[in-house]
Amino acid sequence: MNRFPLWKNMLVGLILLIGLTYTLPNFFGEAPAVQVAPNRSSEKPTPALMQRVEATLQAANITHKGITLDAHGVRVRLANTDEQIRTKDVLQQAMGPTYTVALNLISASPSFLTSIGALPMYLGLDLRGGVHFLLQVDMPGALAKAAERTSGDLRSLLREKKVRYSAIARESETVRLRFSSAETRNEARSLIESQYPDLQLDDSNDGADQILTARLKEVARRKVGEDALQQNLTTLRNRVNELGVAEPVIQQQGADRIVVQLPGVQDTAKAKEILGRTASLEIRMVDDERMDDPAALAAAASGQVPFGDEVYPERNGRPVLVKKEVVLTGEYITNAQPGFDQNNRSAVHITLDSRGARIFKNVTRENVGKRMAILLIEKGRTEVVTAPVIQEEIGGGRVQITGMDSAEESRDVSLLLRSGALAAPMEIIEERTVGPSMGAENIEKGFHSNIWGFVAVVFFMVVYYRIFGLFSSLSLAANGLFLIAILSMLQATLTLPGMAAIALTLGMAIDANVLINERIREELRNGNTPQASITAGYDRAFGTILDSNITTFIAGIALFWLGSGPVRGFAVVLCLGILTSIFSAVTVSRALVNFTYGRQARLGKLAI
Amino acid sequence: MIEFFKLKKDIPFMRYGRVTTTISLLTFVIAVWALAAKGLNFGVDFTGGTVLEISYPQAAPIDQIRHALERSGLTEVTVQNFGSSRDVLIRLPLKSGMTGAQISEQIITTLRVDHANIALQRVDFIGPQVGKELYESGALALLVVCAGIMGYLAIRFQWKFALAAIIANLHDVIIILGCFAIFQWEFSLTVLAGILAILGYSVNESVVVFDRIRENLRKMRNRPIPEIIDNAITTTMSRTVITHAMTQTMVLSMLLFGGEALHYFAVALTIGILFGIYSSVLVASPIVLWLGVSREDFIKPTKQEADATV
């Protein structure tokens, strides 16, 4: 009666084999590699790219240990870290700025394992080192920006249609238009309603003026928020590509948050600097008339800014009066490269998209002889990078900005412009940085906690329950194997709390075997035959095992649902560990027991 | 055969009901008092703020670090050794107008002036809204776990058992929290995860005893309820102690080898495991008794159960 049918034994064997196969890659460790990927996320790595990389390496006389192409890019495996750094330099030089060349680690397991998808566990940032940021997108800021655009649009609309207004001003997220009579207001209202269906319009008056308040409708507001988030995501992706990080994670979280994870980043200061730069670019007209008036300028410097203008410092500290109206924003920029102008001064060459080019052409044609200011807005600080005089109409969307202090600065500015402007400012609301040496230390600590705990448990179980203790220990080992295999298969992120959860689940999993063994002893004490005791022990303990595990499972599910980051890693391992432990404690140990005792029809004694 | 618990007779646990309840109430009151009077020492996860871990090539000059930081305008810092004499933990409360990225860079630059070759091991910066959210979702997780476990036990057994188990185990949670309050140990997100896991785990204990009580109610038709409960506890005691000893072995290994990061997690688990044995056996069962469990509670379920499990 204590015999498994052949299929069941084979099934247990097969599952153990699969478990072993998928656990294996974790023991081979990782090899240094260099990864080459196109900068733009829309571009996919191609076989042609692989050939180009291969040819470059051949030309530079670099011997590699394998070159592969996947969705992330082309990866070159190398013998050691010195070769890795040399290869990175060579490739970076050869591939140019349109490709990201990053240091990476790839699994050193044999290719047959990799080809069946057996990869090592994905290590969390606390184990491999790296930076984690949670960024909050400033939605009111995005809406204020949208309102600013709206006020500009309405102004030109009313001007064009010759509707007289006395003032247009933005107040946080709304635009307020003033009219001297109700008729003009109604005229403006019907005009705006027909042209801008996204706007919600309200009438009011404050005695002197008839006021029309325009605000975005709820649907449009939400759209603005979503667009801002999407643009910020794209911008961050481009910036991270510039950083050269191998496997970055840039994801939306909730309605207005973005998670950025940069594993293995050594120079965290640089990462923070580039990510934290919430730079955006604006092109506006300089208010030349008032700039020529020394009194107005002096008043502006002391805080009395003329209506419709804003005052910002130039590089040399001199204040510049610029109009509030924005001509162009960084959104229209498709490319920006550092370079030099005809006088050999540092410059940034900007290429605009077609819409931007058209606007720029119109503005420059209408304003020849006037000054145009290029503003860089960084962390709430606005600076006029340069304010050149428009010499002629500029078509074709190619713009050259001079006024940089050095070649280095023009490179920085072009990087900022190239990686795009943020649609809305962002703030880091959570940061978790783990140094690379600490990551390695954490792996070691987690590993030791597991291994010594396991050894102690095995020792006790074998001493106390003898042969059955050995079976229990073997099934506990199988449990560990299954757990690591599943984590590797799912490519779930392993964190230090996750490693603690492995230890904890192993400690709790033995409970099932203790329950079974105690039951068998009890049945024997009650005078049952060994074979009957084994059957009864397993059968009766099963209900209890299920019950007792479900409660822990509920706790795990709640933690997964409500937890974040490392706690989630803990919850995943806890839940998976419970599932594997039920299987291994009941089925694997039973298979071992059946294999040993099942054939002996007259079993006299059990070593338990 | 080695046996730790060769018991010929059932131990009359229920007769000690008054004693155990007094002990429970006493520890409970102390824990609640500690929580009310001292409060929990919430970690940066919940309060928001910045924590930096920096390692020095030789013993870290704590006072020098503190002075250097104070000179640079960071007055509310706490600097202490962490793990070894070469590792320093620097804590800062939330400061308006500065992001964690700025503060940590400022600190590193300040300290590099004196010691160029220090290594930044870890930075945690938690903004105010994130801290508040983690706090709220932590409290919600505790509620969800309690409700989930009670619901499950109510379906699987009966509401009296569900109530008894959850009271017994919340009593554990309060005692763990009480210990953290008394000793002012840092209460972090990982500790909370450990407490919730141990809550699920301790309930196992009650489940095993309840399983036996139910089985005994069916088998021992003529015995009074307290004796049935005594028998259930006595027969499962060996398993209870061994299981907990095994889990504790793993936790002890974590306590010894897991380093600072897992220290309080392991401490919380240790307290949870020790009180888990006590409470699920000696708190949950008397409550079941007082709630008036009777054979009638299982007359119908008994039949169904018999079909379902055997």
Image (cartoon, rainbow, N blue to C red):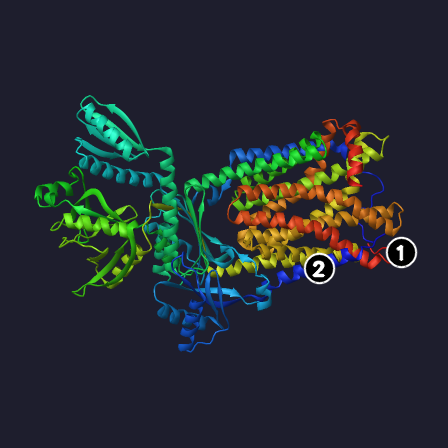
On the question of residue B247 being in view, the answer is no
Identify the image quadrant of the N terminus of chain B. Answer: bottom right
How many marks overall? Answer: 2
* Residue A314 locus on image (x, y percent): 18, 51
Q: Residue B271 versus residue A79: which sits nearer the camera?
A: A79
Element class at badge 2: helix
Residue at mark 2: A14
Give amino acid for label 2.
Answer: Leu
* Residue B170 locus on image (x, y percent): 62, 35
Mark 1 or mark 2, which is nearer the start of the sequence?
2
Asked if disc 2 and disc 1 are in contact, CB closer than 8 Å, the reply is no
Check disc 1: other Cα within 10 Å, few if <14, some if 14-19, many if 20+.
few
Are labels 2 and 1 on one chain?
Answer: yes
Label 2 to label 1: alpha-carbon separation:
29 Å
Q: Is residue A496 above or below residue A563?
A: below
Please identify, in this view, whether the residue under mark 2 or under mark 1 is nearer the observer.
Answer: 2
Residue visible at 16% across and 39% down in the picture: A305
Residue at mark 1: A603
* Residue A407 locus on image (x, y percent): 24, 63
- Does residue A185 appear left or right of residue A493 in this picture? left
- Does residue B306 appear left or right of residue A496 in this picture? right
Q: Chain of mark 2?
A: A
Element class at badge 1: loop
Residue visible at 60% across and 65% down in the picture: A113
